[in-house]
Amino acid sequence: MDKLIILKLGEGNFEQGFTVTLQIGDENVRPTVEITGELPPNPEILRDYHRWQSIYRNLRLPSRPIGLAKELTQAPSLEYCQQVSEEFKVSFNAWLASDSFRSIREKLLEKLMLADNIRMLLQTKDLRLQKFPWHLWDLLERYPQAEIALSAPAYEQVNLNRIATTSDKVKILAILGNSQGIDTKADQALLNLLPNTDITFLVEPQCLDLTDQLWEQNWQILFFAGHSSTQETNQTGKIYINQTESLTISQLKYALKKAVERGLKLAIFNSCDGLGLAWEFADLHIPQIIVMREPVPDRVAQQFLKYFLEAFARGGSLYLAVREARERLQGLENQFPCATWLPVIFQNPAEMPLNWRELFRNPPNLPASLSQTTPVRRTTNRLGFSLILLTSMVVTVILIGIRFLGVLQTLELSAFDQLVRLRPPEKPDSRLLIVTVTEEDVQAQKPEKPQGSLSDKSLAKLLEKLEAYQPQVIGLDIYRDYPVDKDYPALAARMRKSDRFVGVCQLSDSQARKPGVKPPPEVYSHNLGFSDIAIDSDNVVRRHLLALTPAPSSPCTAPYALNVQLALRYLYTKGIRLQFTPDGAWQLGKVTFKPIEAHTGGYQGVDAFGHQILLNYRSSPSPEAIAPSMTLQQVLRGKLNANAVKGKIVIIGTTAETFGDYWLTPYITPQGKLQAIPGVFLQAQMVSQLLSAALDGKPLLWTWPLWGEVIWVWGWSFLGGLFTAYLHRFIYLSLAGGIAIISLYVSCFIFLIVYSCWVPLIPAMLALVVNSLIATTYLNMKFKN
């Protein structure tokens, strides 16, 4: 039979004694017995307890208190603590065996049977009496199904403002507070083993996050693990929710009151010195609270939680589950004295004791032990960890598949261009000199009747002036598919014999229906370079074509690009020659030029013909500021000096718009349009990239392998799911998402400027947002149902 015993300790003190009223009855009915008695004066019992408490608190045990100072300079031994505890137990039972209290004792023995399930409530407003370990009373130890709980003298039943407070899953709000020096993850792992639960974990939350959760949802169990303490001067308890914030129950009064009205039935504070928390909670009339009387060692807290959850989830009563868990702690008392003294229940007498099955709308068939549950649903907050993992992987696979089909290529290239434009500026490359043939230069040559932008007469004068200053190499980025006029034999001889001069031609392309352009007849094949450039679908140049095999029918047979020919000749004088790795990749000095493939970075299905690498523009406000430059007329009028030419690479090309040699770059004009630059400047950019890599150690642009990009995208997808699981308010989720996107953007930018690595930005951003939306949709559907 279920019995309810109420032991009221009324007015009095340890110097004058206490009046006692005993009520005995069955559960759910009015008491059938009420008698009075008295506990005699006994100041020594209070001193004995304080003696034990002082010794216990000065033990060097790893526990969960904050702010409990050690009073003794030398820590007492465990054996001494055990000895003092036994002495207190003897004196405590002697006090309860006093003649004036005998009537209470005898009535209990008369009315109770050993087989009864007994719930005893100790009602007193004397907080010192509440701190005593009443379970040590030898009368209670006679009854194996009995447990004692504390209760406040004033109480009332709370009227729930929601009719349906049960569901198919037990809703638990678990607060993992300041974990400095302790392991709250063990508590989290134990809670995760509970079957049929919906657990929300708040890990070191801010105060606003905690109150929002208490206000916005219907919780049945509130759990706290971390540091706590009792301020005995003002009888308040304090929990430390994170590294910098602590709260009293009164500071959470309105949120907790709302939670109780919505069906909060049990609060568990698996933390130190929690009676102050129970005292404050009593004013909120919560049905049951479990706290620790004194500082609790970390291992004791974890073992109690494990034993309690196992017993409670089997379907037993809360009281018997606490007793079983408390008694099982005896196995730790050789290391942690008085571990069985610590757990205590604080009960609202107006409420019935809690049973695990009562928390469900349709009680499940519960297993005998949590350790035997198969399968067990583990939860990470409101969203299962396994579900976050699964959805993040699915989103990643889908996005990588879409990316592989080239759907995201335009967005990725646009994002890459934006990052390129944000790079810090570099100095112009002083190893180059660019001679431009402007529209004004073309008009000035009209009397000479040039076939192109540069007449034989002007070219002869230009080469004569340049070679007088001993440049390292001269590249002519102007087509001359016709012979030199017979009136300029010196020019023909110079072009034929000079070891500094490199001409240009264009390869034929049958697919693009380009017949190609013949090379200058006077220039031998080893002094030729092709002008062909790889352009993307949006006509922007982001790739650097180094070499390819000409078609047999092509009028141009040069295997290397003009810029490659110029760079190789310059590097040769520095002791660097072109070599090839066993797999056919280029190597200049210590730099290996790994060719791009059809699927490289943001490129998906690109035509990777020949030997191509990514073009790493020399960062500057304008790509035309790559190197010093002069116009044709400036050179011919003698404004050129030796220092600007000697030992340099000179590239000659036209900037006249009538010849159409302009190419789009990732840079933009002040009007916001993509900037087009003349081909001579583009050739200079490519020459500079080769020289900077071989001589300056400037990294080439590169990308991660596919598996690296997949992990990167999956990581951001997983993060999006975590945000939804832990951040329940839209404003917090939006803020965290915005911060994450900014962090992603900054990360990609840092990878680009520091390591010259092109990291996927758009796929990762989409993964973050899409998985967050999927998780949000899932939770909305879940909680709507």
Image (cartoon, rainbow, N blue to C red):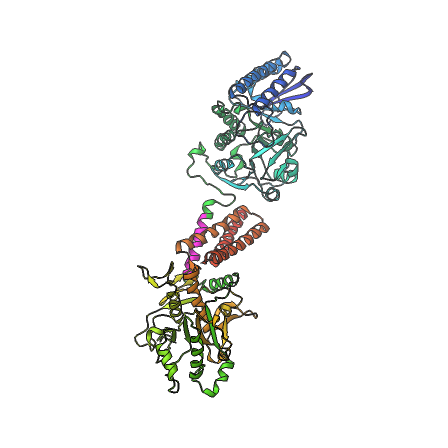
Q: Can residue 637 be seen at all in this image of the molecule?
A: yes
* The quarter of the displayed image where residue 15 is located: top right
Instruction: Locate residue 580: give its quadrant.
Output: bottom left
Viewer-nearest residue: 518 or 370: 518
- At which x and y percent is residue 281? 63, 33
From what the image shows, is residue 563 above or below residue 71?
below
Name the spot of residue 293 as percent of width and height, x first.
58, 27
Q: How many marks?
A: 0
Q: Residue at the far top: name it.
A: 99
Report which quarter residue 605 is drawn in.
bottom left
Question: Is 759 placed above or below 56 here?
Answer: below
User: Main SS of the magenta segment?
Assistant: helix
Q: Is residue 203 above or below residue 68?
A: below
Q: Nearer the viewer, residue 310 or 397?
A: 397
Answer whether residue 396 is magenta in the image. Answer: yes
Q: Which residues are magenta?
A: 389-404
In front here: 244 or 631?
631
What residue lies at 50% left-to-right and 27% top-to-bottom? 325
Residue 720: % across, % down? 50, 51
Q: Is residue 585 left or right of residue 770?
A: left
Q: Does the magenta-highlighted stretch encompass residue 564?
A: no
Residue 759 visible within the image: no
Towards the viewer: 520 or 628: 628
Q: x%, y% of residue 53?
A: 59, 22
